Amino acid sequence: MDMALEIAATLVAQVQKPTLAFLIGGMVLAAMGSKLEVPEPVYKFIVLVLLLKVGLSAGISVREADLWALAVPALLAALLGVVIVLIGGRALAAFRGVSRMDAMATAGLFGAVSASTLAAGMVMLDAEGIAYEGFIGALYPFMDIAALVTAIVLARMSAARRLAAAPAGGGVATVAMGTGTGGDGAMVKGILTDTLKSPAISALLLGLGIGLLGRPESVYDSFYEPLFRGLLSILMLIMGIEAWQRLGEMRKVAHAYVAYGIAAPLLHGALGFGAGLLAHELTGFSAGGVVLLAVMAASSSDISGPPTLRGALPEANPSAYVGTSTGLGTPVAILSIPLWIALADLVIGV
Amino acid sequence: MDMALEIAATLVAQVQKPTLAFLIGGMVLAAMGSKLEVPEPVYKFIVLVLLLKVGLSAGISVREADLWALAVPALLAALLGVVIVLIGGRALAAFRGVSRMDAMATAGLFGAVSASTLAAGMVMLDAEGIAYEGFIGALYPFMDIAALVTAIVLARMSAARRLAAAPAGGGVATVAMGTGTGGDGAMVKGILTDTLKSPAISALLLGLGIGLLGRPESVYDSFYEPLFRGLLSILMLIMGIEAWQRLGEMRKVAHAYVAYGIAAPLLHGALGFGAGLLAHELTGFSAGGVVLLAVMAASSSDISGPPTLRGALPEANPSAYVGTSTGLGTPVAILSIPLWIALADLVIGV
Amino acid sequence: MDMALEIAATLVAQVQKPTLAFLIGGMVLAAMGSKLEVPEPVYKFIVLVLLLKVGLSAGISVREADLWALAVPALLAALLGVVIVLIGGRALAAFRGVSRMDAMATAGLFGAVSASTLAAGMVMLDAEGIAYEGFIGALYPFMDIAALVTAIVLARMSAARRLAAAPAGGGVATVAMGTGTGGDGAMVKGILTDTLKSPAISALLLGLGIGLLGRPESVYDSFYEPLFRGLLSILMLIMGIEAWQRLGEMRKVAHAYVAYGIAAPLLHGALGFGAGLLAHELTGFSAGGVVLLAVMAASSSDISGPPTLRGALPEANPSAYVGTSTGLGTPVAILSIPLWIALADLVIGV
């Protein structure tokens, strides 16, 4: 009972904090039909600054990081990306009205990572004074790329298999399978390259690289770090507006997506939290780090994922996967951040 | 004589301050035919940050405000909005070549409030170290909405009345009036909703709401407050350029608009100053607050007003009302801010 | 040997500093085919803030500057602009496949100044704690305008002369020459006006004017100065991406452009360095000032130059002059800044 009250009080306090307040404010504005819009170039600029900030900070930290302490959560992050896609793809495809292609695309987005959600988690931990490893941002690409590659490879392979299984004959099927297998390596490489070239991953890697090889501390301290929190508040506003507008698209797709969009972030967050606890035992991964691994797992990609999937899986229906992710997955993931903070406090102590 | 000299010295000092210097600089650039342009998305971003800042700061202050101290200036602000429209509509329509519809639209804009002018007033008071009530931003919607609703309702009613007075016959007239009256409530509600949904008012209300219900102090202190002054300097530059460009449109409209555009901000500012003095007597409203009420009354809407009027009064000529407001009203209102500061110093002492 | 090692160590340290790190990072991203883009309005906003910052800071300093100390480097800056164009125009036109018009346009761009390169030089000197005259930004228009006017006048005169020398007959030639001469004054005036109206020069002059006549210190200290370094890092990223993309265009033009694009910034920088040394002897011009005069001379115009030239010399091929300047001249100029710092340290001591 006390615990429930404590969690409730934490939730109320968190909702009052700028990050969630601006997200909810954006949703309320959109629900009221406000004509407030934030121009696209402003959105892109804010995302660029956030990604560079997360990358720079990770790069600076990786310089002095214990490689073992970094390798364990990185491996776990990649594993989480794969596992989330495997579970999600199967679960969604089991429902009526959900094509295998759409299921994989949706699971891919939910396995991939949202920089804004991760940034929101960082700002909320900072506000609570809870420490986390500086290299956390370096885990992002591991989970993100693992999830997108898994989803696209599985979707393409299943499409090839279905083609092969068509009545035209076994000989052709074998040939097609052969080509499929032969092409698999090239396909994985193509997806990897495409993902690395995507704006979000390349901005993050640029920050990582400059943080690792350069000495960007002066500009980090005078610009990226101080502007981070304020720009995030505007980004949360944009995401709240966008989430509400996308919710409308959910009416056009199967109910399974609604259930998935609400339940998946919580389930994935719990998986991430569990993986974080394992790293905590193995390498002394911090409580803040456990929270952020949960947040990354709970988040679904909003910037680089959709265009990557649209390019790789043109047969999938964007209303389904983008609607589920932006309309439900992202707000649920951001709103559940306080849950992981409260849980970490209970289990590890922050 | 001494007083005149003192005012002149204050004016010169104010013109050298960034706010007026950038406004005048923008006008000079435009007059010289400079090709300098600030992109539209940058303009929208700056206005969004200013409105959120004004709203957040007001919301935070309203939390601890004495409701009586707030209610008196709020009521006066709404009254000022109505009175300015009544005076302006009549005065302008008395001139030849000014249609009743255009007169009402222009008076509506001059009754409504400019966030940039208000922000300029705040920054100039801050620079002088003159205190004002934190909740001032909360007065904005009272004056703004009162003015726009009054102008649109009166313009629509007068259009309906003229239609009714047409020779077609009394019976039809009664029906039309009936419909008019029946529709009045709906019309007012429609205008209210439209105004609340407009980008400027919803950004301001969002800031107010988050300031009132949330705890945005951290992001306010680290982002909105420090960036306010610098972003305002760029906004003043944009407004100076825009004012000069709009001045050209004044050649196409009746001379009455030129006289109104120059005289109205001074008259409205004096009305606002008087109302502020009344609040000063009744509730101890500060000298800085009196100045800002005068500035709000003197200002004319530049962001949300024009599209609201264009939607509600499509028969009115935008060259007339937007030209008068942006080309003359806004620069005169901003340039006269030092006047209200000097006056407040003389009358109340700052 | 020790000197070479010392210079090498300085270069490595400089490449790690944010300014060069972001430039190189942008080139690497573009080389890898990254889809990262910074929206055009963001680019324009950053350039506006940088130009206002450089202008404001120069204007504030000119107020208290010794006019003689300012006049000498200003005269040298204008001379450098003319000399660079005279050398470059001749050198390039001597190569096969380079038209006289294209040679002049390219030399004009390399004589004009890049605000971003100058800003990069300032930030790198600041990071080293090397002082320079505050009025340096005021030298920019002297070199920039001198170079553009020289290039355009010479190109137009040579085109008129060729027309006059055509076999059609001496009488026509005389008339044409007459018109040409009569039109020269008007042409120079036209180019001057166009250059002053260009976005870059007018933003710089606006900053200069407000710095000189106004009192913008408060907004300068709270906004322009603190944001300068961070915004420059994003601008360097944009310029790195742009440089790499423009390099591709170099394949379509004569090899002479490649040689010129690499050698000219170094030669012009050396000329600027020499002129700076002269000013150092004559008026005690600082070591940091000498570096920045070299940087200005080495830089080639990236913002206002190209459209000015496109308007004035429509016959010239933009692939040649913009490609050479943006693809080679600008990155070489920025990357060679540490060279001038090291040289100033050796020759004058910083």
Image: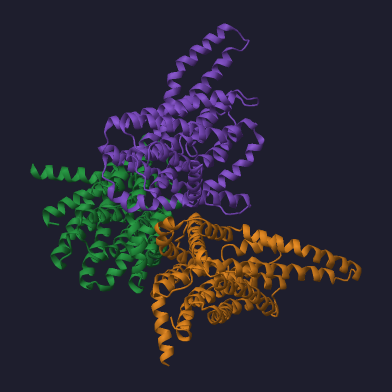
Chain colours: A orange, B green, C purple
Query: Residue C104, image x and y in percent?
Result: 54, 26
* Residue closer to the observer: B340 or B282: B340
Compared to residue B182, the image places residue C236 above or below, namely above
Residue found at the very far front of the displayed protein = C1
Marker count (numbered): 0
Residue found at the very far bottom of the displayed protein = A1
Left or right of A236? Residue A299 is right
Query: Residue C170, image x and y in percent?
Result: 57, 7
* Residue closer to the observer: B178 or B153: B153
On the question of residue B220 being in view, the answer is: yes
* Residue closer to the observer: A184 or C349: C349
Q: Quadrant of residue B324?
A: top left
Compared to residue B64, the image places residue A218 above or below, namely above
- Residue lying at 80% horizontally and 71% vertically, measured from the top left: A162
Q: Quadrant of the N terminus of chain A?
A: bottom left
Query: Residue B212, image x and y in percent?
Result: 33, 72
Query: Residue A155, image x and y in percent?
Result: 72, 69
- Residue lying at 62% horizontally and 57% vertically, measured from the top left: A197
Left or right of C83? Residue B229 is left
